[in-house]
Image: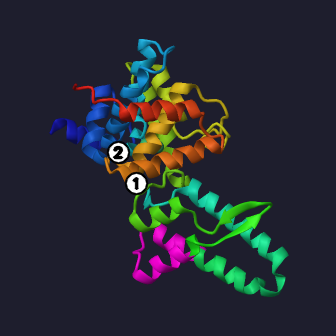
Amino acid sequence: MRVMHRALQLEAEGGTYRSLGELEHAFVRLRPEWALHGRRVAVLLESALGRLRRLSLRQGRALLLAARLHDVGYLGLPGSPPKVRLDAERMGALRARLLRIRAYWMEQDPGQIEAHLQELGRLWVLVNRINLGGGVGESDRRELERYAERCVSVSGQAVAYLDFGELQALLSGSGVCYEEAAPPWRAHVSEGVRLLEAIEEVPSEACQYVAWHHERLDGSGFPAGIRELPLPAQLLVAADMFDSYTSGSLDPARQVEALRMLEHMVRAGRLESVVLEHLMAALQAPPAVF
Ligand SMILES: [Fe+2]
Ligand SMILES: [Fe+2]
């Protein structure tokens, strides 16, 4: 009770926590969903750690601590980001494809361009509405499926209006995750680092891993947009994304969808492929209890 009181007091003050125990306790009490997410990410990483040959014991411990507390910065922010079915990254990829399709029709069918633009606009509005939690009615489902069957050929490459993974995520709700990349919520990274740095017993490597957990190898991440990430940090990125999409669900369809999203990250140069191999091996590893 006393700890709870102190945690609430600290939250109100936007203050710091003096020990790891105090911080972890406050995290579980005040942001239970985020604390659970952190624990699941740590469990997943623990199974993968054995595959990182050059990781010292100290680094391994720091990585697991960072995994548990990588989103602890939400303690210092009011509320949580909204849940979405397609995150900013996937919405960005969809938007880029729709722009390519628009350019294609401008060149190939300028006489009917108004009709093509209206069709693209309807899809974009529909996806945005569903993505932010709007219900999917029968007519929405039919319309999404109709879009998913359409594609144009640009330089010999098929460009889909809506790809299968996007359709699945929008229809089934698989791939539901928090929109952490939206600007007001990006501060959870620096806030988390600030909280951890204030605690003497937290190794600096753990703070570093937390600082990197939204970075991507192609520089598209935040907050720093760096282009170099050591393998353990990439593994945390991958495990974090995997759990964001599955929320701990063992439903194979959700896991496959999450892995497909990570494969897309590898193809886009945002993660090294070996990271995905480690993660997949960890998913197949028997639970530590056996
Ligand atoms: Fe995060
Ligand atoms: Fe996370």
The answer to whether any part of residue 45 appears in the image is yes
Location of residue 82 by image quarter: bottom left
Q: Position of residue 36 (x, y in %)?
A: 30, 42
| Residue 66 numbered mark, or none | none
Let me know if residue 167 is in the magenta part.
no
Disc 1 marks a residue whose amino acid type is Ser
Let me know if residue 145 is in the magenta part.
yes
Q: Which residue is mark 1?
A: 80
> Please, what secondary structure does the residue beneath circle 1 have?
loop
The C terminus, quarter of image: top left
- Asked whether mark 2 lies closer than 8 Å to ligand 2, one says yes
- The one nearer the camera, 65 or 188, is 65
Q: Position of residue 64 (x, y in %)?
A: 39, 26
Side of 280 where 156 appears, left or right: right
Location of residue 27 by image quarter: top left
Disc 2 marks a residue whose amino acid type is Trp
- The one nearer the camera, 159 or 83, is 159
Q: Residues within 10 Å of mark 1 (few under 14, many from 20)?
A: some
Q: Which residue is mark 2?
A: 34
Q: Are marks 2 and 1 in contact (CB under 8 Å)?
A: yes
Q: Position of residue 232 (x, y in %)?
A: 51, 26
Start-end of magenta stretch: 124-146
